[in-house]
Image (spheres, rainbow, N blue to C red):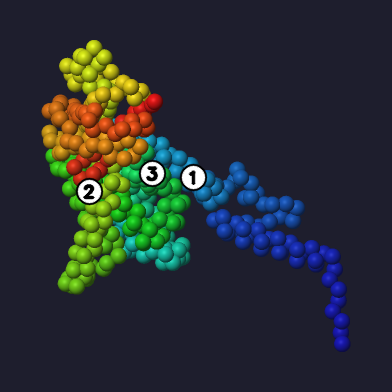
Amino acid sequence: MIEPEPRTEPEEGRITERIERADRAAREDVAGLPPSPALPNGPGPDARDDRVPLLTRVRRFLRDHHRKIWWVHSLYALGLGVFVASFAQKGLERARVLAVTLGLAWLLAIVVFRLFGSGKKQRDLSLSPAQDRVSFFVMTYVLKNLYQGMLFFLLPFYWKSTTFDAPNACFVVALGVCALLSTLDIVFDRVLMRFQTLASAFHGFTLFACLNLLVPAIFPDVRVTVALLSAAGVSIVAFWTFHAPSWTYREPKWLGLLGAAVLAGLGLAWIARPLVPPVPLYLARAAVGPARLADGAPALLADGRLKLEVKTLHVSTIADLIAVTEVVVPGERAGRLEHVWRQNGVEILRTEPKEAVVSDDHRVKLQSTLAGKLLPKQLAGEWSVDVETEDGQLVGRTKFSVIE
């Protein structure tokens, strides 16, 4: 048997050189560069940054830092949202811009899932042609901006209508979380828009919150509960359109199922109405004080304000108490509002207060008196006067303490 001759040192060097050259060519091909010959004593001239084309360097930078860039964009989106929230402070009439935004967001969200599917199908999008990936990116980017505009526009209105020591505070917290998620590009693209159920729930909640404000903005004299039920019904239909194919609208049994879902949604909205702030109503001012002063003079000024507003009272000074509140309403009619007097959370008196005419700045003044004969035997404790709609939605609350 003939033994192979051992490799000489020059031959081993040539093999090593060929391996290095192949490795360099592979790396440059991944980076989008044409392979260039490597010299034995060092890298070729094309490897120097000053010889690499600008477009290639930009592509390298985006490839290496794309996650950081998305987080920077998220900060920009958050700043834009703050600007939109300040724009909403200009007044309720600006809420009408929500109508067009709502329609666009609904249509675009449906198109995204009809074209690209959800879950695994979207995860496989990275293997699709570049044109499909670009289309998906553009659609989700536009959709994010629509959601950001809507949610940050809504926040100031719901913030003013929320009583933060009451259950309806949960709604504005959820709205704030959704607004924040809409600015986080990576979360929005890779979580919310990847799963159809999550995306439809997110859209349904946003749609409900928008319509709950939009209906009284367009029809100022409608009751806030009617707006709430209308928003709930439309949101159920929108949720249905995300999941049901078009042929189901021609089948009576599917239409019947949709009708049953809408009725169930309306019932749930009615039960859960205390959890929803009654936008656009909100409590602008509230005060409690003695119905008469020590000298027997009336407690009210000519403009309806109290001469003496208190936060703490001693039991010896209490006779009759009076509460005066100012509620901002969208139209000429406020609907029926109630004052509810409570001690330590227990209802003492529920009454329809004396109502002043709605002023030019859409404020209505409400006034009620808690007569001494209605006072409980034990007066000390934490008291509150709530302003509620006739259907039990809390508009606002003022508190005072009685001490011994």
Question: CA–CA distance between discs 3 and 1?
Answer: 23 Å
Q: Which amino acid type is marked by label 1?
A: Trp
Q: Residues within 10 Å of mark 1 (few under 14, many from 20)?
A: some
Report x, y in % for residue 59: 52, 50
**In front of the other: 138 or 312:** 312
Q: Say which mark, if any, is on residue 107.
A: none
Report x, y in % for residue 391: 20, 45
The residue shown at (24%, 28%) is 372
If the image is split into quadrants, where does the N terminus sit?
A: bottom right
The residue shown at (57%, 58%) is 30
Q: Say which mark, if any, is on residue 228.
A: 2
The residue shown at (71%, 64%) is 18
Question: CA–CA distance between discs 2 and 3?
Answer: 18 Å
Looking at the picture, does residue 322 appear above or below residue 106? above
Q: Which amino acid type is marked by label 2?
A: Leu
Report x, y in % for residue 20: 70, 60
**In front of the other: 68 or 270:** 270
Q: Residues within 10 Å of mark 3 (few under 14, many from 20)?
A: some
Q: Secondary structure at mark 3?
A: helix
Q: Which amino acid type is marked by label 3?
A: Val
Horizontal side, residue 161 vs residue 360: left or right: right
Mark toward the start of the polypeptide (3 vs 1): 1
Q: Secondary structure at mark 2?
A: helix
Quadrant of the image occupied by residue 139 = bottom left
Q: Which residue is mark 1?
A: 71
Query: Can residue 175 be seen in this snapshot?
Result: no
